[in-house]
Amino acid sequence: MLESVLFWSIAVLAVASGVAVFRVDSMARATYALAVSFVAVGLALLLVGLDYIGLIVVLMMVMEMAVMAVYMIMFMGMNPALMPMSMVHGHRAAVITAVGAFVLLAAGALLVPWPQRRGTPSADPTVALGEALMGSKMLVMMTVSPVMVATIVAGIVLASHRTRYDRLGDDLRRRPADDPQPGGVGR
Amino acid sequence: MPDASIVQVSPVWALLAALLLGGAAVFAAGLDGVLVSRTQGRLLLTGVRMPLVETARLLRQRRRSTLAADSLLWRTGGAGLVVVALLMVAVVPLGRWTLADLPVGVVWFNAMDVVVWALVWLAGWGPNATHSLIGGYRFLAQALAYELPLMFALTAPAVAAGSLRVGDVVAAQQGLWFVVWMPVAFAVYCLAVVGFSFWGPLAPAAGVDIAGGVLSEVSGPDRLLVQTGRYALLAAGAAFAVPLFLGGGAGPLLPGWCWVLLKTLLLLSAFVAIRRRLPSLRADRFVEVGWMVLLPVVLLQVLVVALVVVGRG
């Protein structure tokens, strides 16, 4: 009973704050409405008994929204981010796509004959997850991680207007580097 | 390896936890007041009374507001700090008793300290004021520098204990406290606690050079909440270091809960004492220190711990 009440309040909160993302006119409110929605999803995972994954969802999503605030200033400039603005682009197409996707997924969830559970969940899902990641799925993880890191680094390199030649001179020999903001280690 | 000696108590005891956390916060504020009084050559009693006087002053102060402030986000950011500190101590065992014996207590603490990122930025954003917003962004830059080292500092005791349950981490320190053979992780952890409480050397987010930064526009009861939240975060960070590095309730003569409180207050006093002893670390400098020095050093610490664990079999 208590679990049902908890689940439904979390579910309603997740959907309501998800809707709020597109209803508010401030980027900060939209960002943190999305964060609240994700936190609710993380709490729902806690209810299922997936403690580790649930908390990691909360941790990652809150951090991600905070970092988004950094990008908001870094790459968007101050003005658009600080002014009231609409949070939707391509309104009609977006609504049609969203409703279509929702109907498809909801219909699938309701109409598919779900199979009976085979086997039982592990006593400690965190250990089971760790063993899966570090055991049979290790090769996948080892491939995916460098690709993801390379993507992040490449994205930053493409977005940044300064290169190592600006920092270290044409022959890369200038020490210390010429930075607009000197770092704390004196490189 | 479930630890039978840790007992999960009824949620009603959260009231006692809140009282203890509040007491520790008042203790920290009083100690800070005493240290200020001593440097200014005033009566020490003035310092002891400082938290009380400040509370009375702020409760009577009229709330100042700014043009086009986003009150919802502003208040959330200010009031959330106390809540986060309370949620942090929920997983700290007081001797044998704990409020929430989560199998992933260490990750819980980590998730809570990340919520501080959002709260401080919101507190900076809310009033729609320049200095306040700059303070919020300074905090994010600082957080980007301390957070990854903190995550690996939290990893080291968990690796040594082979568990993310706080009770198991305490049990694994029966022979030797973790602070003895993972001092780097402990030091980085303490630095990060000072960082997420934006305190002392890591307080440029509330620096005098930007008229108080995230604190510049907040007044009255709201300011009281933010300041209480800072002290409570500092206290919660000190409290979590006890089961993680300082052997939990282990100690001679006194009962476990007494030792936990004692160690917490000692570490908290150290945090308070460094406030005026170290120069302010600018966020732009600290970022490079975090990524170029702290992160490699703490990774090496985790490697050493992992090798020891593998070596022991």
Image (tube, rainbow, N blue to C red):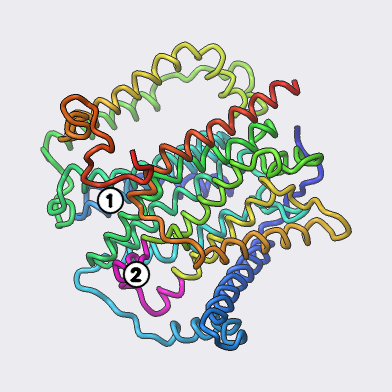
- Which residue is rendered at x = 34% and y = 65% of the image? B214
Dominant SS of magenta comes to: helix
List x then y, in percent, for residue B243: 69, 48
- Which residue is rendered at x = 47% and y = 54% of the image? B195
Tell me the quarter of the picture where residue A174 sits. top left
Question: Regarding mark 2 in the picture, which secondary structure is present there?
Answer: helix
* Residue beneath disc 2: B208
- Front residue of A41/B301: it is B301
Is residue B217 highlighted in magenta?
A: yes
Question: Regarding mark 1 in the picture, which secondary structure is present there?
Answer: helix
Image quarter hosting the C terminus of chain B: top right
- Which residue is rendered at x = 45% and y = 86% of the image? B57
List x then y, in percent, for residue B47: 57, 82
- Which residue is rendered at x = 63% and y = 52% of the image? B240
Q: How many marks?
A: 2
Q: Is A81 situated above or below A152?
A: below
Residue type (three-letter) at the residue carrying disc 1? Ala
Q: Give the distance between the C-alpha atoms of the residues marked 2 and 1, in whole angstroms.
A: 37 Å
Determine if residue A140 is in view.
yes
What is the magenta range? B205-225
List x then y, in percent, for residue B229: 49, 65
- Pointer 1 local density, CA inside 10 Å: few below 14, some 14–19, many at least 20: some
* Residue beneath disc 1: A20
Residue type (three-letter) at the residue carrying disc 2? Val
Left or right: A89, with A40 as reference point:
left
